[in-house]
Amino acid sequence: RVRGDIQREAGPALVSAMRGLVYDSLRTVDGLIVTDEKRIQDLVAAAAAADTVDARATPDLNSVVVEFVIDLHAQLLPALLNHDRPVPLDPLLRWIPTTDYTGIVIYAADPLPVHGTDRVARVQPALFPGIYYLDETGDGISRLMEVDHVSAEYIAQWGPVLYSSDVAGAEFNERAGARPLRIVAYRAFGRYSTDVVISNGDALQILASENNRTLIAEGRVVLVLDPGVLD
């Protein structure tokens, strides 16, 4: 009976723990689900699939400490999505010299100006970060990638991006491949400084190739951040 009670409480407990996570540049998970009862129910149902790895009584026998393990990508993130198929990126209507890459690596470890503000900040991780690019004047920005551009299948497999401070590890190599497009971020963006802004020229390298646009849809993007924000 106790184990059954523990499993029934797993979903609500894990959802409560997730509420403070940053969903995107403007919202936390709590801000996303607070008025959406169906999404709350979907998330609770997904969280209820968590595996109990340890359950033990406290020394005073007044309560139980339970440890759960859940796959964030495969089990929880799909419950936060609004799409099954990715929104395709529009191809360029003019020719731009480029090449086909195996992944996209964006270096954003240093403090960056936050677009539209006087602040300087380090880029922070989020469940669904965005990528923007400067227009040709260097003043405005346009959207390159947000969650709806990434396939739900790949989000469940490994998330929309890989966050890393290790540019030589196995995860980095798997995601970026042997010939990635390497980009240095110009700015951060958003209330929580989770999005990156890249140059117009770098964005055109992606948009000019069907192969490179597919890298976005398959989540073959690595954001290299300061290790201090990934702890």
Image (spheres, helix red, strand yellow):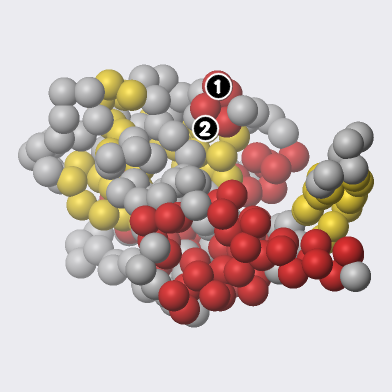
Look at the picture and state if 175 lies above or below 12.
Answer: above
Q: Residue at x 27, y 21 (%)?
A: 120
At which x and y percent is residue 83?
A: 44, 76
Q: Is residue 100 visible?
A: no
Q: Which of 208 and 134 is in front in this view?
A: 134
At which x and y percent is residue 192?
A: 34, 38
At which x and y percent is residue 149?
A: 40, 65
Binning the other alpha carbons within 10 Å of mark 1 as few (below 14), some (14 to 19) or many (20 upward) gives few
Q: Quadrant of the C terminus?
A: top right
CA distance separating discs 2 and 1:
12 Å
Residue 214 in the figure: left or right of residue 205: right
Residue 187 in the figure: left or right of residue 104: left
Q: Residue at x 58, y 58 (%)?
A: 15
Residue 92 in the figure: left or right of residue 80: left
Q: Which residue is label 2 attached to?
A: 224
Q: What element carries label 1?
A: helix
Look at the picture and state if 169 lies above or below 81.
Answer: above
Q: Which residue is label 1 attached to?
A: 228
Q: Which amino acid does label 2 sit on?
A: Val
At which x and y percent is residue 73?
A: 63, 59
Q: In which quarter of the image is the N terminus?
A: bottom right
Q: Residue at x 73, y 57 (%)?
A: 70
**In terms of image quadrants, where is residue 90?**
bottom left
Q: Nearer the viewer, residue 168 or 5?
A: 5
